[in-house]
Image: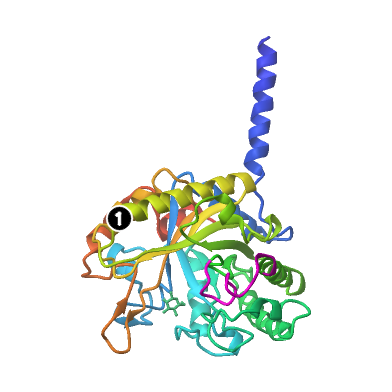
Amino acid sequence: MRNKWLLSGLLMLGFHEVCAQALQVSDKRATSKTIALFRKLDKLKKQGYLVGHQDALAYGVKWKYQPGRSDIKDITGDNPALYGWELGHIELDSAVNLDTVPFIKMKKFIREGYRRGGVITISWHGDNPLTGKSAWDPAPGTVRAILPGGSRHDVFVKQLDKVAAFLGDLKGNKGEAIPILFRPFHELTGGWFWWGTNSSTPQEFKELFRFTINYLRDKKHLHNLIIVYNTGGGFKDEQEYFQRYPGDDVVDVVSFDTYQLGKEGLQRPFIDMLKNNLTIIERVGQKRKKIPAIGEIGFNNVPYEAWFTKVLATSIQGHKIAYVLLWRNAGFKADDKSVEYYVPFKGDRSEKDFLKFYYLPQTLFEKDAAALRLYN
Ligand code: BMA
């Protein structure tokens, strides 16, 4: 009898082990560091989530390109655990991205963050390959035109070659490929980008996504990519979330973008929506064996001074996600009349609350990420 219990106990343990090991990065040929990062991201969500910031090392409110600086570091003494970078305009052979960050500097910042133990995520607001206008040109027929057989397919493939060259040139000290959370065609359930709902059918979108990832893997031999499926926010259920899902073999992270809007904003509806969307992606993650995360989030100018603890941390409380990425501190616009920032800078009204947010046990910044040894 005792042995029987022991046996069933062992079997159960075995079952749990199998379950625990079942989460695998979708690229069968992923590098060992990429596999390690993917597993660690899955594991760390039990204890907390990485906090990220777009363009953190390049500029902040009222400063640009000051070595070693970031707005988060000015406040906390620590850097974000996750660095977001943006490739828009690389497809044009431009030396700077659409937000004027030179690609050469970007590569340096990426290596710097990685060497310190941070994580890198990359998005691509590429210009419309059909019309030549910006990413925000949802011209009908764009996606059909760039799929294999389409009139602009060759143009798109050349653009992908440039993206691949950048991604393939990101190397650590020992020449190893730096693992990247690659987030193409983000906010894919919205209608504002050329890859969105106004310019493609779900089927066309899925084909585009699959073509892109398989091209980068098979033709460009990139095996350092963890692929992020990234919808808009405010979806009602799993079915809506899945409308444009391209398949488990080309997705590793299930995420969404969402922003609180309004001057001061009503916190409650935003919190409810966020919690609901987190519940949905957690469920999806469990079913599909993918990692849930928030691809982009923020409240421009942070008009509610306790937003980080009372809205962001409160909403995530009780949910298990691997990371959140706060959007960029673009700072003052050329006319000096408006300012864009999602993380407080020194002296800002939400500075104190951000420091509280930093000290919460579940928020992981770069020192935590380094201690977690995410690439081993
Ligand atoms: C948007 C804004 C723009 C920027 C774009 C791509 O949300 O921050 O100013 O050009 O992202 O980074």
Q: Residue 40: tell me if it is visible.
A: no
Is residue 228 shown above or below 286?
below
Answer with the quarter of the image where residue 79 lies: bottom left
Q: Depth check: 239 or 358 in front?
A: 239
x%, y% of residue 335? 29, 89
Q: Which quarter of the rendering shows the C terminus?
A: bottom right
Q: Residue 49: tell me if it is visible.
A: yes
Amino acid type of the residue that numbered disc 1 sits on in the rendered structure: Gln
Is residue 143 shown above or below 251?
below
User: Image check: 220 left or right of 235?
Assistant: right
x%, y% of residue 169? 62, 77
As drawn, the residue found furthest toward the right would be 149
Q: Quadrant of ligand 1?
A: bottom left
Residue at image mark 1: 267
Q: Which quarter of the rendering shows the N terminus?
A: top right
Is residue 159 shown above or below 249?
below
> Across the whole image, how many numbered discs are drawn on residues?
1
As drawn, the residue found furthest toward the top would be 1
x%, y% of residue 127? 56, 84
> At 46% across and 58% down in the image, what residue appears?
234
Is residue 82 within the magenta segment? no
Which region shows up in magenta?
190-204
x%, y% of residue 67? 38, 78
